[in-house]
């Protein structure tokens, strides 16, 4: 459990600084819509990664056992 908090912190801290900077740059350099495209891509990637790891570690029956 403690290692999961450590991994989360490795992503959370830099992301909380980088995301607003990247979002602001995308808004000014490209367009407002690009911010949502990038955010949506990361969200979909996260969901798919979660599902792949869930199935790999616990089998396909884990998808229905929530």
Image (cartoon, rainbow, N blue to C red):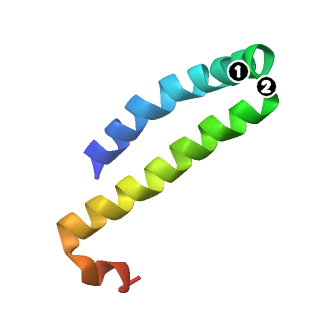
Asked which quadrant contains residue 51, the reply is: bottom left
Side (left or right) of 34 relative to 15? right
Left or right placement of residue 30 versus residue 57 in this view: right
Q: Quadrant of residue 59?
A: bottom left
Crowding near the residue tagged with mark 1, few <14, some 14–19, many ≥20 C-alpha atoms within 10 Å: some
Q: Secondary structure at mark 1?
A: helix
Q: Which residue is mark 1?
A: 26
Image point (80%, 30%), residue name: 32
Q: Nearer the viewer, residue 12 or 61?
A: 61
Q: State the residue at coordinates (35%, 86%).
A: 65
**First along the sequence among labels 1 and 2:** 1
Residue at 77% x, 22% y is 27
Q: CA distance from mark 1 to mark 2?
A: 6 Å
Taking the spot 37% from the left edge, 85% from the top edge, the residue there is: 64
Alpha-carbon neighbours of circle 2 within 10 Å: few (<14), some, or many (≥20)?
Answer: few
Residue 41 image point, x, y percent: 55, 43
Q: Which residue is mark 2?
A: 31
- x and y percentages locating residue 63 in the rendered image: 35, 79
């Amino acid at each position: 459990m403690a290692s999961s908090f450590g991994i989360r912190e490795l992503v959370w801290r830099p992301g909380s600084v980088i995301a607003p900077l990247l979002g602001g740059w995308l808004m000014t350099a490209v367009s407002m819509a690009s911010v949502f495209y990038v955010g949506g891509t990361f969200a979909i990637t996260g969901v798919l990664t979660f599902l792949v790891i869930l199935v790999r570690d616990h089998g396909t029956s884990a998808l229905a056992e929530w």
